[in-house]
Amino acid sequence: DTGVSQDPRHKITKRGQNVTFRCDPISEHNRLYWYRQTLGQGPEFLTYFQNEAQLEKSRLLSDRFSAERPKGSFSTLEIQRTEQGDSAMYLCASSRTSGSSDTQYFGPGTRLTVL
Amino acid sequence: AQKITQTQPGMFVQEKEAVTLDCTYDTSDQSYGLFWYKQPSSGEMIFLIYQGSYDEQNATEGRYSLNFQKARKSANLVISASQLGDSAMYFCAMIHQAGTALIFGKGTTLSVSS
């Protein structure tokens, strides 16, 4: 299987601009997750899709953040009116329904810097 | 609430030595899963090993083994015969139900020297 891919790998933007990230999961994985990781911390959950349905959102996902997975394949994460506090690594993961383990496989991440 | 604690910010080991990375967890659930991931400086999270709460035997994957002590709520990662390429950040994580969020610890930086 081809692994999870994310684009772009790096994004530098000015405060107030909108940015969009893309994630392509492992083919046939029906679950897709977004996490955010700041320096020195472990990843923190943002949101989760099963197929095209967004089933769970974290309190971290403010109304400036929106995620979609329109056809149950790739997903996009958009941040509107970026703030310096949004600077972080944004990680995407995917998994498939396989019982209790449901191992999540991660992509390489998109590193966002807001100036 | 679920919580993962990794108390070792950094560990240093020489090549070919074994190393244990500590992880304790807190949950009131009976069914849960424990994971270890490796994150090199490139940033990608690499899955290493999984242990289910009902698994009676400790998980092993090549040079990685998970020392699962349920009563103590610990899930330590043991890496045998360390290699230079093992230098990375290691994260312990927990999931309480399939299809939900992983909860991560703060990680341990492992440095392997020759």
Image (cartoon, coloured by chain):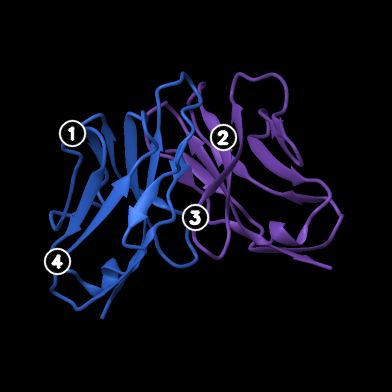
Chain hosting mark 1:
A
Residue furthest toward the front? A2
Would you call the spot at circle 3 few (<14 residues within 10 Å), some (14-19), or many (20 or more)? Answer: some
Residue furthest toward the right? B16
Tell me the residue that label 4 is attached to.
Answer: A18
Chain hosting mark 2:
B
* Percent coordinates x, y for residue A47 in the rendering: 28, 43
Residue furthest toward the bottom? A115
Considering only order in the chain, which callout, 1 or 4, is on the residue closer to the N terminus?
Answer: 4
Seen in the picture, residue A90 relative to B114 is either above or below; the reply is above
Q: Which mark is residue A71?
A: 1
Q: Pointers 2 and 4 in contact (CB under 8 A)?
A: no
Q: Which residue is drawn at the image coordinates 46% and 18% (left, top)?
A: A99
Tell me the residue that label 2 is attached to.
Answer: B34
Quick one: A95 or B35, which is closer to the camera?
A95
Query: Mark 4, mark 1: which one is toward the viewer?
Result: 1
Seen in the picture, residue A68 relative to B108 is either above or below; the reply is above
Chain letter for the part of the structure drawn in blue = A
Report the amino acid beneath label 3: Glu
Cα distance in 3D space between marks 2 and 4: 36 Å
Query: Mark 2, mark 3: which one is toward the viewer?
Result: 3
Report the amino acid beneath label 2: Leu
Report the amino acid beneath label 1: Lys
Cα distance in 3D space between marks 4 and 1: 23 Å
Please, what secondary structure does the residue beneath circle 1 have? loop
Determine the colour of chain B: purple
Please, what secondary structure does the residue beneath circle 3 have? loop
Chain hosting mark 3:
B
Quick one: B43 or B7, which is closer to the camera?
B43
